[in-house]
Image (cartoon, grey):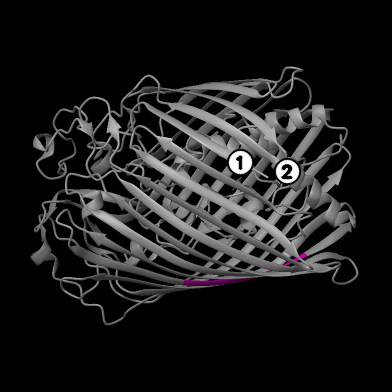
Amino acid sequence: MNHYSRSLTAKRHAFGLLKSVSLTTTLTVSFSVIAYAQSSSNTNLQIEATGSQESNLSILTPTKILQGNELLDKLGTTLGATLGNELGVSATGYGVGSSRPVIRGLEGARVQILQNGLSVGDVSSISADHAVATPLQNAQQIEILRGAAALKYGSGSSGGLVNVVNERIQTALPEQVSGVANTSYETVNNGRAASGLIEAAFGSVAVHLDTAINNAQNYRFPGGSIQSQGQPAGGWIVPPEGGAATNYTGKLPNSFNNQNNLGLGASYIGKSGYTGISIERLNNNYGIPTPEGGAINQSQNRYDFQHQTRDPFEGFSSLKFSAANSNYNHTEFGLDGVAAALWKNIANEARLDLSHKNFMGWKGNIGAQITRASLEATDLASGSYAIVPSTKTNSNALFWIEEGRWGPLQANVGLRYDNVSQNPNAATQYPSSADVIVGPTINNPAPKNRNFNLMSYSAGGLWNFVKGYGLGAAYTVSQRAPSAQELYAYGIHESTATFMVGNSNLSKEISNNLELTAQKVLGKVRGKASIYVNKFNNYIYGNYIAGAVAVDESFSVVVAQQAAATIKGAEAELTYNWNQFGSGARLFADASQGTFDAGGNLPLQPAPRVGLQLAQQKEKWLANASYTYSFEQNRLAFWEVGPTPSYNLLNAGLSYTEKVNRVSWTAYLNLRNLLNEQIRFATTPMAVRLYAPQPGRSLMVGVRATF
């Protein structure tokens, strides 16, 4: 077995062992890795991340990797729910059907979502009610990247980048047939879920099959659905009927969620590399819990191809080519069940990545990436466009990433150039502003082509001044082209209770981020702390226009505008690991706040949080508990109704694992929101935040088998 196969086998063995222990560790992945290292004779074992060339000691690795027990415990039906309690990460929350991560106060197009290193290809960045089209139930790991590591995959990710890894295209032959099966039931929404995964080898061909299904009814919540508020500020309109809207108790209407997916993969494993393909079908039907109600029926077909050659020629360690085609669509239904709008997005992406070997202390990558996307949104009643006209987006990019090591010093640099063009349907006919908007005159966008040249770069360093202790700094400039919606939108959006107006004259958005860090990575007590300042030129935001309302629905009018803005924040966590296997504690806190340089707060900013997590394993039992306190968010944009109330979130879990022959059986229970608190996220648009709290107290029970 060559070195490459041995390292992959070690990684898979560690991941499999972590999965088989239990389902309910709530601590950071460091606990699981440390605990395994304490019990293993292989003291050099390192868990490697998909998005890096180095081990977990590299400063180009993801800032967070969820895998093993930690991923299984935190796994939710949405990506936002799964990552929402990570350091510096919050979530939007349209019930439990749609939720994206919010990283350091940034969301939407500023947080790119990938699947196996390539774009998901959905329309979730356009609006928070559009779910991320990547299945999570059988994900092997989820990575969060920032800085130079993120530039490898895309520009404009000023908040960060999330990569969901499912390993359908395997890179090493399984030594034997292996798999996982899981089933669970949750009380808060009568949720029933099941998933399965199996991998095997036939000669030199590795095959993978995974599937999952999740059916959940409307969920229960404490108290009344409407957030108690005074009169709205800023002259904008609260969604229809305002405080007189139905104040539900018990179960929240239109908070159901039904998902199913199927994934297949096959790869040929040779001595010098591999070649593989995979296919995926995803279906997702979920409710939109706003006063207007409604639902979204989402589906996607995805096809992936990967090829890697190791040591392709002298001086280079790897040549990798990957490509994906995704055909996405969703239909939006009104409360009456009638289909109102059809969204389609066809995306094709390809990237070439060449890694070179050590040269004067440096290792790195050079590569190219091409993306083509075609977006269509059709109003089914009129046959015209819905919110945004048909738009083709083309992107061509070159990137270069390097990391160097010289004794106690590490450094990284990254450079990325993108050319992005937005090409709307030139024949688009916008309605007259006077016919659809009452109040101040609003200029219509123009369906004209736009082209943007983007140059993003990053440089950072880490000084390990004493063994186990380090000080670091990083500076990243990230440039982003406006999205099709920001440029060309013009129409009613029921799910956010707004009439959206784009601005076809927007300039590129530029983020300048400086971050300072301190860390301790050895010993029983470990920790890290960061402070950062992110200054934006031409920050793009939706400005609520006082006195302007849509004729049909009396919704607020929101116009895309730009302004200078700054986000400042701090994050810290401290971990303690006892000598016993699997025991530990974690204390963490994070806070960020965005402001316009001219005065006022950015919208949808997360509230500061503090939290404590504990876990204890004894023989075959594993118990854990986590507590998070989220402060009141009263620093709101002038048009936001608030404050967003503080809340206490207490979760706990217990599991028992028994191995019978080759199968490890784990019975588990998870208790969530034990205090039955009413929880509302400041990062959720008002149309949902004011009328749809998160689920109340819940018990989940399940059984998982790993072989």
Amino acid type at image mark 2: Ile
Q: Is residue 330 visible in this depiction of the protein? A: yes
- The residue at the point 75 percent across, 61 percent down is 365
Asked whether 166 falls inside the magenta stretch, the response is: no
Locate residue 288, reporting x and y percent: 27, 48
| Sequence-first tag of 1 and 2 | 2
Answer yes or no: is residue 309 visible: no
Residue 137 lies, in percent from the top left, at 52, 48
Cβ atoms at labels 1 and 2 below 8 Å apart: no
Q: Is residue 114 above or below residue 142?
A: below
Q: Secondary structure at mark 1?
A: strand
Which secondary structure class fits the magenta region best?
A: strand
- Which residue, given by chain and number where applicable, does mark 1 sit on? 705
Say which of marks 1 and 2 sits in front: 1
Percent x, y of residue 686: 26, 41
The Cα–Cα distance between marks 1 and 2, rounded to whole angstroms, is: 35 Å
Quadrant in which the C terminus appears = top right
- The verdict on residue 351 being magenta is yes
- Is the residue marked by circle 2 packed among few (<14), some (14-19), or many (20+) residues within 10 Å? many
In the rendered view, does 213 fall on the left or right side of 72?
Answer: left
Q: Is residue 223 above or below residue 49?
A: above
Q: Is residue 636 left or right of residue 666?
A: left
Quadrant showing the N terminus: bottom right
Q: Name the outermost residue toward the front.
A: 661
| Residue extent of the magenta highlight | 347-354
Task: Specify whether 670 is left or right of 414.
Answer: left
Residue 90 at x, y = what percent? 45, 37
For image coordinates 77% across by 17% down, the residue present is 579
- The residue beneath circle 2 is 59
Three-letter code, disc 1? Ala
